[in-house]
Amino acid sequence: MKANVGNLDRALRIIAGVVLLALTAMNVIGPWGWLGIIPIATGLTRFCPAYPLLGISTCKVAAANEPPAA
């Protein structure tokens, strides 16, 4: 897996996931909040499976490792 999630994107994903899980644990939102596990997982692994399908990468390191265009 090639990293495609940058630092800011990573931090926002982890924060959003933790907030969703906390709201679910406090019974503020329903069981859909358990989906907060997904942004936490993608933030920790630095890989989002949807990004390659959409042709997106917010990771500057991945772009720097690619060979220059001829």
Image: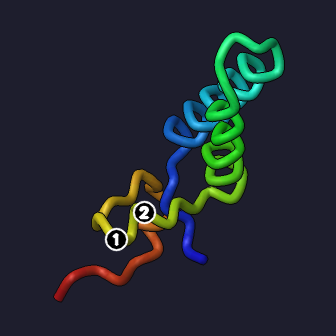
Residue found 56% across the figure and 65% down from its top: 3
Residue found 68% across the figure and 21% down from its top: 19
Q: Position of residue 2 (x, y in %)?
A: 55, 74
Q: Position of residue 28 (x, y in %)?
A: 69, 11
Q: Secondary structure at mark 1?
A: helix
Mark 2 burial class by Cα count in 10 Å: few <14, some 14-19, many 20+: few
Q: Quadrant of residue 12?
A: top right
Q: State whether residue 9 is above or below residue 56.
A: above
Mark 1 burial class by Cα count in 10 Å: few <14, some 14-19, many 20+: few
* Residue 69 located left or right of residue 19: left
Residue found 69% across the figure and 32% down from its top: 31
Which label belongs to residue 53? 1
Work out which residue is located at the far front of the displayed protein and give it: 30
- What is the quadrant of the N terminus in the image? bottom right
Q: State whether residue 62 is above or below residue 20.
A: below
Work out which residue is located at the far left of the displayed protein and give it: 70
* Residue 3 located left or right of residue 24: left
Work out which residue is located at the far bottom of the displayed protein and give it: 70
* Residue 22 located left or right of residue 46: right
Q: CA distance from mark 1 to mark 2?
A: 5 Å
Q: Label 1 is placed on what type of residue?
A: Leu
Q: State whether residue 31 is above or below residue 7.
A: above
For mark 2, what is the residue? 50
Q: State whether residue 70 is above or below residue 7.
A: below
| Label pair 1/2, CB-CB below 8 angstroms | yes
* Residue 7 located left or right of residue 30: left
Q: Secondary structure at mark 2?
A: helix
User: Foreground residue, 26 or 22?
Assistant: 26
- What is the quadrant of the C terminus in the image? bottom left
Q: Quadrant of residue 13?
A: top right
Which label belongs to residue 22? none
Q: Label 2 is placed on what type of residue?
A: Ala
